Image (cartoon, rainbow, N blue to C red):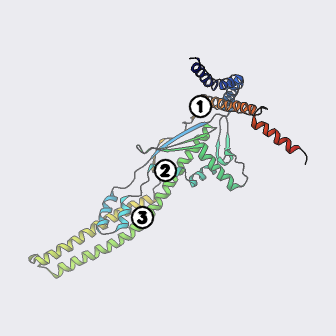
């Protein structure tokens, strides 16, 4: 009757002994387990609070829809005549999406123009220079400095989002000076407008040249159609009495009408493209201008402090258990350690 009880008691003791050594280790090193997380948390909070405050400037815009209404009519007429190039040009299929503008703001060309622009702002921390000077990369070669500054600006100073549902493109610029943040954000808006103006004027100039050639061809075709109709009517004065001649005259009238419609549409489109070629109005509608919108960037002091304390505790636990493991393995009765001492002694023994 007593043997099973002793066995059960021994098994229970073995299970308890599997837990208590770990708790004993934690109790022996309790000061370290408390001091290290607290030190890490306090140090993180102090560094976060002592670092210079940063300010975020916000700006947002939506792409403007400026496709002329005449384009649809011109595209339909051009398609009926089999003029695919003019049909595609008139349909306005090259409209730009909000995601395009978001990618444009992150493009290397626009970022390069932003960082090489010279800014001069006042405030608590005045700054005069470029973003290359602000980033202060370690590399000395001018090209490498600019590449490092672009990477620094894109990773640590710029944030761009494009909302698909509303079409709003937003950009945030973060620096140590609120006026500098606003100036950089405004510069990026200006660069987007400059790109749109160049693109529109270049496209309108190419369209003007193309439409002008087509208008000349359409005018010549209209003259030919009108001449053919006039010659037919002069040669067949009594065509109303002949069904065959009447059908031929109707066909010639239709050709004149279609040629007239095409020439009229091309003439209107030519005037529109001439205006677009010199038009300098913005193609984006700015919702929020960065002027006066810079706010203090969040520091997340509490979150960073808690994460630092948690990380310090994990490191402390791993460290104390590693130290205890090494100490136990160095006990003289441990087979591995005894063999290690033996081998070390043999190696020290001169041959």
Q: Observer-nearest residue: 255 or 173?
A: 173
Instruction: Say the numbered circle drawn on residue 207.
Output: 3
Categorize mark 1 by other alpha carbons within 10 Å: few (<14), some (14-19), many (20+): few
> Which residue is under mark 1?
300
Q: Residue furthest right?
A: 350
Q: Nearer the observer, disc 2 or disc 3?
A: 2
> Which residue is under mark 2?
101
Q: Earlier in the sequence, mark 1 or mark 2?
A: 2
Q: Nearer the observer, disc 1 or disc 2?
A: 1
Q: Observer-nearest residue: 56 or 202?
A: 56
- The image position of residue 9, as x and y in percent, is 60, 20
- The image position of residue 221, as x and y in percent, is 30, 74
Q: Please say if 159 is above or below 241.
A: above
Badge 3 element: helix
- The image position of residue 114, as x and y in percent, is 60, 50
Indicate the quadrant where residue 17 lies. Answer: top right
Q: State the separation of the CA atoms marked 2 and 3.
A: 23 Å
Viewed as shown, does residue 68 lie left or right of 348?
A: left
Q: State the separation of the CA atoms marked 3 and 1.
A: 53 Å
Q: Residue at x 71, y 23 (%)?
A: 28
């Amino acid at each position: 009757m007593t043997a099973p009880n002793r066995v059960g008691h021994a098994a229970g003791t073995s299970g308890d002994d599997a837990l208590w050594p770990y708790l004993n280790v934690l109790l022996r090193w309790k000061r370290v387990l408390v001091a290290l997380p607290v030190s890490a948390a306090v140090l993180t909070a102090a560094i976060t609070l002592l670092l210079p405050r940063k300010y975020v400037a916000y700006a947002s815009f939506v792409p403007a829809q400026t496709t002329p209404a005449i384009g649809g009519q011109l595209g339909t007429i051009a398609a009926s005549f089999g003029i695919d190039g003019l049909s595609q040009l008139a349909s306005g299929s090259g409209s730009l999406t909000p995601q395009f503008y978001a990618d444009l703001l992150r493009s290397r060309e626009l970022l390069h123009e932003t960082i090489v622009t010279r800014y001069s702002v006042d405030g608590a921390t005045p700054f005069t220079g470029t973003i290359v000077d602000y980033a202060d990369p370690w590399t000395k070669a001018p090209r490498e400095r600019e590449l490092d500054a672009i990477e620094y600006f894109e990773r640590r100073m710029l944030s761009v989002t494009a909302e698909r549902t509303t079409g709003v493109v937003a950009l945030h610029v973060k620096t140590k000076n609120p006026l500098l943040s606003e100036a950089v954000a405004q510069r990026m808006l200006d660069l987007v407008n400059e790109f749109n103006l160049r693109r529109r004027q270049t496209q309108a100039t190419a369209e003007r040249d193309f439409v002008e050639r087509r208008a000349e061809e359409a005018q010549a075709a209209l003259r030919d159609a009108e001449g053919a109709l006039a010659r037919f009517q002069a040669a067949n004065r009594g065509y109303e009495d002949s069904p065959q001649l009447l059908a031929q005259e109707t066909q010639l009238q239709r050709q004149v009408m279609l040629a007239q419609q095409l020439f009229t549409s091309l003439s209107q489109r030519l005037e529109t493209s001439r205006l677009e070629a010199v038009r300098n109005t913005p193609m984006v509608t700015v919702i929020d201008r960065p002027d006066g919108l810079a706010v203090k960037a969040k520091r997340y002091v509490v979150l960073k402090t808690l994460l630092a304390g948690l990380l310090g505790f994990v490191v402390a636990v791993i460290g104390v258990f590693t130290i205890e493991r090494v100490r136990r393995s160095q006990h003289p009765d441990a087979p591995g350690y005894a063999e290690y001492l033996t081998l070390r002694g043999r190696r020290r023994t001169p041959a």
